[in-house]
Amino acid sequence: MSERNRVVIANPWQALRQFTDARIALGRAGVSLPTQAHLAFQLAHAQARDAVHDRMDTAALQAALSALSNDVLALHSAASDRQTYLQRPDLGRRLDAASRDTLLRRQQQVGSAGATGIDLAVVVADGLSARAVSRHALPLLERVLPVLQSAGWTMGPLALVEQGRVAIGDDVGHLLGARLVVVLIGERPGLSSPDSLGVYLTWMPAPGLTDANRNCISNVRPAGLGYDEAAHKLRNLLHEARRGQHSGIGLKDQTATLSAGPANATATSFLLPPPRTDTGG
């Protein structure tokens, strides 16, 4: 038996680690974590901190997204730099003056052509993990936008926003006259997920809306919610939002129930006892 095996005491739940990235069943060395687990924690913490401070490569992402849209706008929030963005969340929720002027000119051009608004505006914002956007925004949009365009949805320019937060979509969507806005944004990094992408959907976007007006699809990445499933959920939510003309707390994601079929209709929480099947006779 090696020296390490004599010192480190394994946890009986260790086999469960194959099913999750969560830090469970790490074992112990005396009353402390084993050195390997401790170093892995420090590495994950450093990766999460780096993800928050990474800058979005706007030019590279703009070039990649141009394969989906001929009209990709590079915009910026009112937070001038990363430090300001982290200290002033309110500035990350609205566009700076130059970006507002860009969208206003675009809307005036569309208005002069006799258009009556667009169905969907898409915003890609760095959020708290530019890494997530760089890795996952394009693969997700590749599975969503062509399907919507084939179904006759009208699209606005694709907005790429630096130093943006979720509510920046309300500003962009409102200025473009969009009936729906979708924001793809880097989520706050976790200790096992520094590249998690969030997707937020809002009907009739306008400044001043709250999270109660939005629907969220979280943890989009290969190690979390896969691209195909996330795209399926997003397409379903978009169609239901347009059909019902609302989003947020009044709009529920039904994709899990629909895909599971009738067998899922009577499913209950594993914390509750199974339903009784006797008739009492």
Image: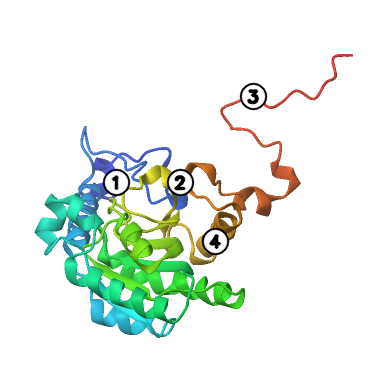
Q: What is the spatial separation of the Cα atoms under label 4 and label 3, in whole angstroms? A: 30 Å
Position of 156 compared to 152: left or right?
A: left
Name the residue tied to disc 4: 229
> What residue appears at the point 54 percent right and 61 percent down from the top-left corner?
229
Of circles 4 and 3, the one toward us is 4
Name the residue tied to disc 2: 15
Specify the label residue 173 is tagged with. none
Position of 217 compared to 194: left or right?
A: right
Q: Is residue 260 above or below residue 156?
A: above
Amino acid type, mark 1: Asn
Position of 166 compared to 55: left or right?
A: right
Q: Of label 4 and label 1, which has the lower sequence position? A: 1
Amino acid type, mark 3: Pro
Name the residue tied to disc 3: 273
Q: What is the spatial separation of the Cα atoms under label 3 and label 2, in whole angstroms? A: 27 Å
Q: Of label 4 and label 2, which has the lower sequence position? A: 2
Position of 5 compared to 221: left or right?
A: left
Name the colour scheme. rainbow
Q: What is the spatial separation of the Cα atoms under label 4 and label 1, in whole angstroms? A: 42 Å
10 Å crowding of disc 2: few (<14), some (14-19), many (20+):
few
Specify the label residue 5 is tagged with. 1
Closer to us: 7 or 142 = 142
Closer to us: 29 or 245 = 245
User: Residue 195: x, y in percent?
Assistant: 32, 61
User: Is residue 26 visible to us here?
Assistant: yes
User: Residue 59: x, y in percent?
Assistant: 24, 81
10 Å crowding of disc 4: few (<14), some (14-19), many (20+):
some
* SS for dot 4: helix
> What residue appears at the point 55 percent right and 55 percent down from the top-left corner?
241
